[in-house]
Structures are given as structure tokens and as C-alpha cells.
Image: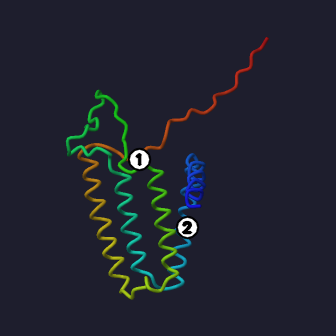
């Protein structure tokens, strides 16, 4: 039974792979449902904080190269005449999406159990998360500038269809 369920889940994951926009829209909808649930319940701030920290860690893996230029791994090109080496992420886009979606779904499931609703002063958690986010991103951006890489690309360049030329015979 478990193997059949896992096989069915894998089938749908494989089918969703080329549909990037739909996948990310699903994540946004799941995240909005989670935020609405936490907002209306006025609780589960520790769960939200943990969710934020986990997804920040996933984001770092997504924007970090697989081989760190500071270590012994292959270096990223720094000059125009060097060989082109594409940016390879430590965490691929699909795995980033899937792990984020799983975390939001698990966080939503946790909101159904009162044991996870630990009373805390949420502004302190929010402030601490923002400080952690900005310090981490500052360090990551410095790393990007130092080793001259950009972790985002906008895909393959597409050329539009030119004017149709009809043969006059």
C-alpha cells in the first residue's frame, strides 16, 4: 500500500516538473492558506518561525553554487575569455519547491494540534527573523560580488517569429 502511494505521488511529481509557474502558484496558494489560518487562530507563532527559518535555509541552498569558490572545487569564470561554466545550484529549483511545499503543508497540519501553539511574544520572533534574514543575505550578496556570479537566470533567450514572407510565383 505504501509503495503504491509513493509511486502515485512520484507520478504526479514527474508530471508537474515542466509546469514551473503552476508549481510555484500552488506553493503561493498553500502559503496564503497557512498565513490565513495562523492569522485567524492568532497563534502558532513558533511553528511560523520554524517554517521561516527552514525556508530561509532552503533559499540559501538555492542561491548558493554547488561548488563553493572558496574551497577546492572548480571556480566560476571571472573573465569574458574564460570557459563558460553554468551556475549549478546546491539545491535545484524542483527540490527547493518541493521541500518548501512539504514544509508549508506540515506547518499547516501542525496548526490542527494545540500542543504546537506555544505562547510567545511574536514581535520578538519576527524581529529576530528579519535580523537573521538581512545578516544572512548581506553575507550571501558579498559572496556573490566577490566571486562574480548571479544565481538567477531568466531562461533561454527566445526569438519571436519574424514576419511571414510569402513567395510570389
Tag of residue 152: 1
Q: Are marks 2 and 1 in contact (CB under 8 Å)?
A: no
Q: Nearer the viewer, residue 89 or 135?
A: 89
User: For the residue carrying disc 1, how many other residues have a C-alpha within 10 Å: few (<14), some (14-19), or many (20+)?
Assistant: few
Residue at the extreme right of the image, as rendered: 169
Kind of element beneath mark 2: helix
Horizontal and vertical percent position of residue 20? 55, 50
Horizontal and vertical percent position of residue 76? 28, 38
Mark positioned earlier in the residue sequence (2 or 1): 2
Q: On the picture, is 70 further left or further right than 115?
A: left
User: For the residue carrying disc 2, how many other residues have a C-alpha within 10 Å: few (<14), some (14-19), or many (20+)?
Assistant: some
Kind of element beneath mark 1: loop
Horizontal and vertical percent position of residue 15? 60, 48
Q: On the picture, is 33 further left or further right than 168?
A: left
The correct choice, above or below, for 85 with respect to 112 in the image is above
Horizontal and vertical percent position of residue 90? 35, 49
Count every numbered label the image shows and give the total.
2
The coloring applied to the image is rainbow
Residue at the extreme top of the image, as rendered: 169
The correct choice, above or below, for 26 with respect to 154 in the image is below
On-image quarter of the N terminus: bottom right
Q: Nearer the viewer, residue 63 or 99?
A: 99
What residue sits right under mark 2 in the picture?
30
Amino acid at each position: 500500500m505504501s509503495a503504491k502511494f509513493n509511486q502515485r505521488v512520484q507520478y504526479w511529481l514527474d508530471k508537474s516538473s515542466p509546469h514551473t509557474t503552476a508549481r510555484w502558484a500552488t506553493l503561493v496558494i498553500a502559503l496564503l492558506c497557512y498565513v490565513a489560518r495562523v492569522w485567524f487562530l492568532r497563534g502558532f507563532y513558533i511553528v511560523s518561525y520554524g517554517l521561516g527559518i527552514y525556508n530561509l535555509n532552503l533559499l540559501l541552498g538555492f542561491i548558493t553554487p554547488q561548488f563553493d569558490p572558496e574551497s577546492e572545487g572548480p571556480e566560476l569564470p571571472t573573465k569574458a575569455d574564460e570557459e563558460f561554466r553554468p551556475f549549478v545550484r546546491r539545491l535545484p529549483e524542483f527540490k527547493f519547491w518541493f521541500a518548501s511545499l512539504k514544509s508549508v503543508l506540515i506547518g499547516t497540519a501542525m496548526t490542527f494540534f494545540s500542543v504546537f501553539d506555544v505562547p510567545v511574544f511574536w514581535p520578538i520572533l519576527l524581529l529576530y527573523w528579519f535580523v537573521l534574514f538581512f545578516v544572512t543575505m548581506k553575507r550571501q550578496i558579498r559572496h556573490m560580488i566577490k566571486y562574480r556570479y548571479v544565481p538567477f537566470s531568466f531562461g533561454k533567450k527566445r526569438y519571436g517569429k519574424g514576419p511571414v514572407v510569402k513567395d510570389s510565383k
